[in-house]
Amino acid sequence: MKKNEFVFSLSRNSIEHYLPQSKRDSLLSDIEDIDKREEVLDSFGNLCLISHYQNSSLNNEVPSEKESGMKVEV
């Protein structure tokens, strides 16, 4: 599928955290304040709308792995 052929469907989509919630402590270790880590993790800039299938396959990967997986899908 070419980029200009992408069709967005309102069904079976999911919101994914770019920085995974399960790895918050290791990925955000430079932020000492725990409340600030949560704020960064749940900020709009850390959320992506992707297909349910992609979310299942990329779930707890680090950002570099998610980028690779998303490029394959597009």
Image: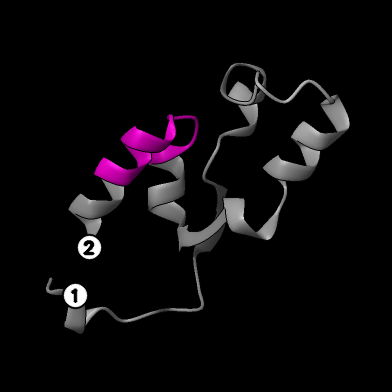
Residue sitting at x 71%, y 53%: 43
Between 11 and 40, the residue placed more toward the observer is 40
Between 58 and 34, the residue placed more toward the observer is 34
Q: Quadrant of the C terminus?
A: bottom left
Q: Position of residue 73 (x, y in %)?
A: 23, 56
Between 10 and 32, the residue placed more toward the observer is 32
Residue 40, numbered circle: none
Cα separation between marks 1 and 2: 6 Å
Rendered image coloring scheme = one colour
Report the magenta stretch's main SS. helix
Mark found first going from the N terminus, 1 or 2: 1
Which element type, helix, strand or loop, lies under badge 2?
A: loop
Q: Quadrant of the N terminus?
A: bottom left
In the image, is 51 to the left or to the right of 16?
left
Which element type, helix, strand or loop, lies under badge 1?
A: helix
Q: Position of residue 25 (x, y in %)?
A: 67, 18
In the image, is 32 to the left or to the right of 16?
right
Pointer 1 residue: 3
In the image, is 74 to the left or to the right of 43?
left
Q: Position of residue 44 (x, y in %)?
A: 67, 60
> Amino acid type of disc 1?
Lys
| Start-end of magenta stretch | 58-68
Residue sitting at x 23%, y 53%: 71
41 in magenta: no
Marks 1,2: beta carbons within 8 A = yes
Residue sitting at x 55%, y 38%: 19
In the image, is 44 to the left or to the right of 32?
left
Residue 74, numbered circle: 2
Residue sitting at x 79%, y 43%: 39
Image quadrant assignment for residue 24: top right
